[in-house]
Image: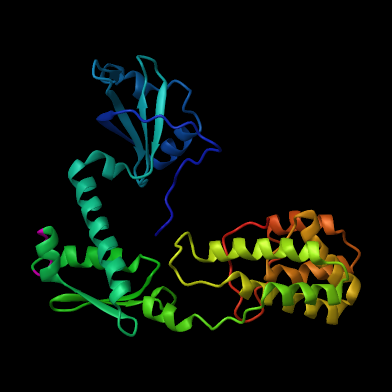
């Protein structure tokens, strides 16, 4: 998806109102960009159109839509009789706001593309799937076979999806190649067999590196179980890595750190559990280097949250969208 101009606010208080555009005021690009910096100033074009702006008895705000000659976005304003924007709202796509038919058509096409891509990923064979124009006509009434503009538009929408690598317009269908990482059959094939370590063996490994680490082992096991739930993505029936597979990864990291930096640094990484600062396996290498250079264990969790410990150089490690405990 191409970037658009939006107004992002920190912790906004959003209130929805019904609005109707009574007139479009199209400024030069320079005038529009200056106007964006002076919304609370008086402007002649607002005073000249003051009678068009009001809130009616049904609660609908009758507004001006102000935009620039070569701008996709605009500002919706209602002045309450003043010469400046008493109420205003940024509109990322002014054309869609102006034409109900365009907005409705865009919604229908987006819904269809979403359905086709979702179903296509489930049925893809060797990364390819097709959707026929006749099926599209049956589901939506759209005649793509006789409308090259609509065919091109829908093909452009499909290729903009992150799951899609290529789209071919055939005589009677779209032929789509999906990106391998999104194909269901590819995902099934690519899930490696994970080595698993029972908790007791994990605890013994930690004790061998740092004596009396049973309490720390229990906390690392809690963290491993949290990672198991995150790996399932909230779907209990979904196959994912078990907690015992994460224990095996943790143990391997601790042994690597012990070999590279010695017992003391490996013991410090193990002790992170005792201050509730467990980290991901792919963060342990840089965490150990920080500790070996004289850093404190209390630095590690803040560094993890800032993302400065992430190291995906080891094969098989993948980014996981969760926070350290």
Residue at 27% across, 16% down? 51
Across and down, in percent, residue 307 comes to 68, 60
Read off the magenta span: 141-145
Residue 143 counted in the magenta span: yes
Give above or below for 249 relative to 23.
below
Q: Is most of the magenta stretch helix, strand or loop?
A: loop
For residue 252, side relative to residue 213 (left or right)? left
Residue 110: in magenta span? no
Indicate the quadrant containing the C terminus: top left, top right, bottom left or bottom right: bottom right
Quadrant position of residue 305: bottom right
90 relative to 305 in the view: left or right:
left
User: Which quadrant of the figure has residue 258?
Assistant: bottom right
Residue at 25%, 17% in the rendered image: 56
Q: Residue 137's x, y, as percent?
A: 10, 64
Can residue 143 be seen by looking at this rendering? no
Give the percent coordinates (x, y) of residue 83: 40, 18
Residue 92, above or below 286: above
Task: Please tell me which residue lies in front, 264 or 32.
Answer: 264
Of 207 and 125, nearer the camera is 207
Residue 254 is at least partly visible in this image: yes
Name the residue at the front extreme.
200
Report the quarter where the N terminus lies: bottom left
Going 22% across and 57% down the picture, which residue do you hit?
109
Residue positioned 33% across, 69% down in the render: 159
User: Going by the image, does 136 lie left or right of 311?
Assistant: left
């Amino acid at each position: 998806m191409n970037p658009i101009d939006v107004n992002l606010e920190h912790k906004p208080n959003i209130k929805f109102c019904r609005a109707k555009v009574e007139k479009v005021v199209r400024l030069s690009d320079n005038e529009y960009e200056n106007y964006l910096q002076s919304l609370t100033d008086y402007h002649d074009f607002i005073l000249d159109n003051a009678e068009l702006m009001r809130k009616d008895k049904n609660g609908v705000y009758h507004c001006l839509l102000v935009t620039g000659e070569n701008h996709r976005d605009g500002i919706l304003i209602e002045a309450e009789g003043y010469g400046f924007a008493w109420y205003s709202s940024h509109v990322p796509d002014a054309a869609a706001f102006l034409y109900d038919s365009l907005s409705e058509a865009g919604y229908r096409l987006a819904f269809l593309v979403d359905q086709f891509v979702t179903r296509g990923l489930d049925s893809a064979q060797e990364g390819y799937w097709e959707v026929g124009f006749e099926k599209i006509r049956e589901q939506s009434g759209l005649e793509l076979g006789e409308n090259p503009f609509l065919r091109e538009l829908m093909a452009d929408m499909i290729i903009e999806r992150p799951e899609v690598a290529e789209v071919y317009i055939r005589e009677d269908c779209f032929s789509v190649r999906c990106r391998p990482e999104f194909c269901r059959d590819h995902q099934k094939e690519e899930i490696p067999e994970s080595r698993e370590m029972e908790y007791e063996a994990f605890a013994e490994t930690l004790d061998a590196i740092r004596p009396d680490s049973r309490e720390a082992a229990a906390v690392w096991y809690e963290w491993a179980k949290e990672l198991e739930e995150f790996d399932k993505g909230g779907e209990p029936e979904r196959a994912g890595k078990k907690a015992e597979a994460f224990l095996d990864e943790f143990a391997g990291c601790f042994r690597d750190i012990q070999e590279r930096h010695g017992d003391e640094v490996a013991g410090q990484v193990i002790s992170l559990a005792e201050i509730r600062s467990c980290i991901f396996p792919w963060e342990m290498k840089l965490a150990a280097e920080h500790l070996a250079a004289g850093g404190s264990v209390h630095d590690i969790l803040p560094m993890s949250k800032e993302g400065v410990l992430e190291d995906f150089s080891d094969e098989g490690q993948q980014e996981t969208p969760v926070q350290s405990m």
